[in-house]
Amino acid sequence: MKTRTQGGEICILQNSGERIVSVDAVTTCSAVFFVWPWAAAGNYLPAIGKSPHPIWSDLYCKSTGLKREKGGAIITASYEGSEMNWNSGDDANDRMIEVSCTMREEAIETHPNFKEWAGTPKAPIGAIFDDDGRFTGWNVNAEIGDEMKGVKSYLVPSYAGTISYVSRGKPSLNGIGKIGGGGGLPSVGGKRQWMNIGISYQSIADGKFRVTENYLLSGPGGWNKKVYA
């Protein structure tokens, strides 16, 4: 317990809290102070983003609460910082990776075996094409066409990934909507590619940033390079 006295004012550290480190290396803690008299509370209120924790000096005040008690004040403050090893020079040296997979529909024309089944507009096998070369359906008089009748789409795995980390600076937004990135996310093989579909970040009380990057994996043919750089 720490006690400070000044000109008849008293500030007592009642509880120094518990240091908690999350999976993305953001560290939090709290502290509770009793100040007397009530009028002196403002003199001891931690400054948000500036005041360090009374025990853990690498954590800085994020928020404060104040209430009256016995002619004095109870101050409750929360603190946060980053539990990182910055010696490597890599801001993202402690990344948290999350991947989820569901199924989504794709047009049957995107299937890697489509030409083997359908042929081409000039040499159809099991498909019907219009005068402009667009696939319109399957020829039920052809063996493969009868097997595929009614099939206009198919299910493919849909992978989404997130990368979370703490950065010393604001992340760049230039990579959003572009093919590539996603270091640490699994490789699925074939022509599939990851693409950055969004970045979110928030400042931490110690001046660093908690960053989350979101990625989406392409279908079997990869992302269209004419559409996505």
Image (spheres, helix red, strand yellow):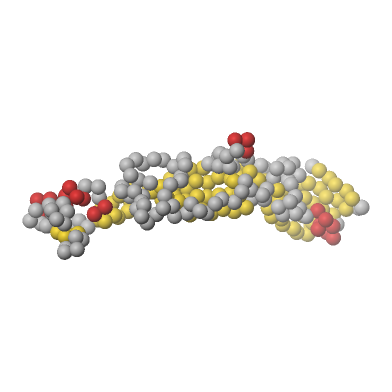
Quarter holding the N terminus is: top right
Residue 131 picture location, percent across and down: 16, 64
Residue 143 picture location, percent across and down: 9, 51
As displayed, is residue 99 above or below residue 121?
Answer: above
Residue 60 picture location, percent across and down: 70, 48
In the displayed orientation, state which residue is furthest to the bottom.
Answer: 131
As displayed, is residue 43 above or below residue 183?
Answer: below
Residue 78 seen in the current view: no
Q: Is residue 139 left or right of residue 220?
A: left
Q: Is residue 5 left or right of residue 171?
A: right
Residue 165 picture location, percent across and down: 55, 45
* Residue at position x 14%, y 55% in the image: 122
* Residue at position x 68%, y 48% in the image: 206
In the displayed orientation, state which residue is furthest to the left.
Answer: 141
Nearest the viewer among 130 and 78 is: 130
* Residue at position x 47%, y 42% in the image: 183
As displayed, is residue 32 above or below residue 86?
Answer: below
Q: Is residue 82 left or right of residue 138?
A: right
Nearest the viewer among 134 and 95 is: 134
